[in-house]
Image: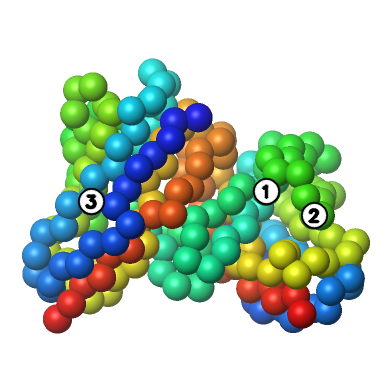
Amino acid sequence: LAKTTQPISMDSYEGQEVNITCSHNNIATNDYITWYQQFPSQGPRFIIQGYKTKVTNEVASLFIPADRKSSTLSLPRVSLSDTAVYYCLVGPNAGKSTFGDGTTLTVKP
Amino acid sequence: SQTIHQWPATLVQPVGSPLSLECTVEGTSNPNLYWYRQAAGRGLQLLFYSVGIGQISSEVPQNLSASRPQDRQFILSSKKLLLSDSGFYLCAWSPTREETQYFGPGTRLLVL
């Protein structure tokens, strides 16, 4: 299983773009990269998933370089409600992916 | 649409007492089901997963067990709780093992 490394915490201000990078040097050919968001006392919520290059949806973008050994979650114009823990998962299927300790994002006014 | 339910929301149990947490999924058939535990300030630890009725895989040997008596029902149990069993327990489902997991609201368990 690919191990992931994320910053423990990040601070930002409302209206800024936030980029959270995840390192996964041992990613396998059939692994996907998935990001989740978790608020206190709630279950994680799917944000975005990708395999290579760039994926964009209504809430975030995911940038994956050609070697796929890292990925960057980009949150445009964050608000206070984006304060949460963000997890990067790598695996061929979500069931075998490992949740690390995630990145705690704090958005300040 | 699919929904996932967990109960109870919170539970306080004495050491040595039994445990039964239930998770049910609506709006889908033959889901893959998962039990996770989360310690305070930490990530999620996968405890069990199931790809079908009666099929349970354990990821971490421990004081807990899981059962899947029906297609959309997943139960987490213990015969005798330990202090270390305290935590936030999350149930999740996915359409297949290659797809995204969807989490329930969780059960916060405190063993005293």
Provide residue B34's location: percent of width, then percent of height.
Answer: 64, 48
Q: Where residue B32 is drawn, which disc sits there? A: none
Q: Residue at x 83, y 67 (%)?
A: B81
Which residue occupies the foreground of this view, A80 or B1?
Answer: A80
Provide residue A63's location: percent of width, then percent of height.
Answer: 19, 38
At label 1, which amino acid type do we have? Leu
Distance in Å between CA atoms under marks 3 and 1: 27 Å
Q: Are marks 2 and 1 in contact (CB under 8 Å)?
A: yes
Q: Residues within 10 Å of mark 3 (few under 14, many from 20)?
A: some
Provide residue A26's location: percent of width, then percent of height.
Answer: 38, 25
Same subunit, labels 2 and 3: the answer reads: no
Q: Does A1 sit left or right of A109 as displayed?
A: right
Q: In terms of secondary structure, where does tag 2 sit?
A: loop
Q: Which residue is mark 1?
A: B47
Q: Residue at x 32, y 48 (%)?
A: A6
Q: Residue at x 89, y 71 (%)?
A: B16
Q: Residues within 10 Å of mark 2 (few under 14, many from 20)?
A: some
Q: Are marks 2 and 3 in contact (CB under 8 Å)?
A: no
Which residue occupies the foreground of this view, A77 or A98?
Answer: A98
Identify the subunit bearing mark 1: B
Q: Residues within 10 Å of mark 1 (few under 14, many from 20)?
A: many
Residue B71 to residue A42: above or below: above
